[in-house]
Structure formats: C-alpha cells, structure tokens
Amino acid sequence: MKTLFILNDGPYGSERPYNALRLAGTLASREGCEVKVFLIGDAASCAKSGQKVPEGYYNVQVMLGKVIRAGEVGVCGTCMAARGIADADLVEGSHKSTMAELADWTQWADKVLIF
C-alpha cells in the first residue's frame, strides 16, 4: 500500500502532526507499505532541525527521522520561505518540495491522509 500524508499544522500547536507521524512511522515499518509525508503551511516547521523539547515530550524531528529512513518527506518551498526556513535548516533526509511534486505524490498514492 502506498500512503501519502499531508500535514498542515505546526509541530507543537496541536496533536495532529504527532498523530499523523505516529501512524506514518508505524506504516513505514510494515512490509509492503510505502509512505510519503508532505509538510505544508505551518507544518513546514515540523522539518526544522535542532528541535529542543522538554524531557518526556515528543520530538517531531525524531518522529520524522523514522519516516525518512523508510520513506520520503517533502516540505513546501513556498511555506518554508514564508516562515524563514532555509534548505540548510531542514531535518537531514527531508527536502524542499513543490506543488508539482505534491501532485505527483497524490497520483502515486493509493491513499491520501490529511492532518
């Protein structure tokens, strides 16, 4: 199964990115499952490297790493620019992306989940 996750919310303002990445990570670890994550809007901040969160609190950067090891993570370039996020600021393994790539990924996917 090929699943595309589209995340819209910032990393810590709600639990949507947390829950989306929990599911994406679980699917990515299963045989026969392919996962791609596209971060758009405030979710572009999820891919900001160097996140420091209180002990015992989930870290979206770490959760993205699990998905990156088994799949792909794209970050909307327009959304990055609007938030002052440079390519060099991104979590290793993620990449600046475009609407064209999101369209390609949408056609590729068997399922599209939006958080």
Image: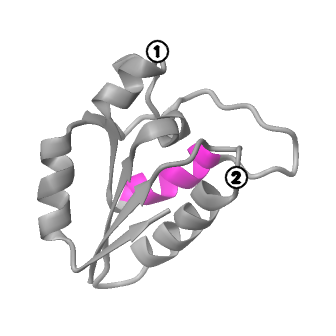
- Residue 102 placement, left or right of 45: left
C-alpha separation, residue under disc 2 versus residue under disc 1 = 21 Å
- Residue 4 placement, left or right of 16: left
Q: Quadrant of residue 114?
A: bottom left
Classify mark 1: helix, strand or loop. Answer: loop
Q: At which x and y percent is residue 36?
A: 31, 60
Question: Which one is earlier in the sequence, the residue at label 2 or at label 1?
Answer: 2
Q: Which residue in the structure is indicated by mark 2?
A: 14
- What label sits on residue 49 in the rendered view? none
- Residue 4 placement, left or right of 106: right
Residue at horizontal 70 percent and vertical 44 percent from the top: 12
Is residue 91 positioned above or below 30 on the image?
above
Q: Residues at badges 2 and 1 in contact (C-beta under 8 Å)?
A: no
Q: Is residue 81 magenta?
A: no
Mark 2, Cα crowd under 10 Å, few <14 / some 14-19 / many 20+, is few
Residue at horizontal 16 percent and vertical 47 percent from the top: 101
Q: At which x and y percent is residue 113?
A: 40, 71
Given residues 55 and 78, the one toward you in this image is: 78
**Residue farthest right in this picture:** 55
* Helix, strand or loop for the magenta stretch, by majority: helix
- What label sits on residue 84 in the rendered view? 1
Magenta residue span: 60-69
Residue at horizontal 66 percent and vertical 31 percent from the top: 51
Q: Is residue 61 magenta?
A: yes
Is residue 18 positioned above or below 29 on the image?
above
Mark 1, Cα crowd under 10 Å, few <14 / some 14-19 / many 20+, is few
Classify mark 2: helix, strand or loop. Answer: loop
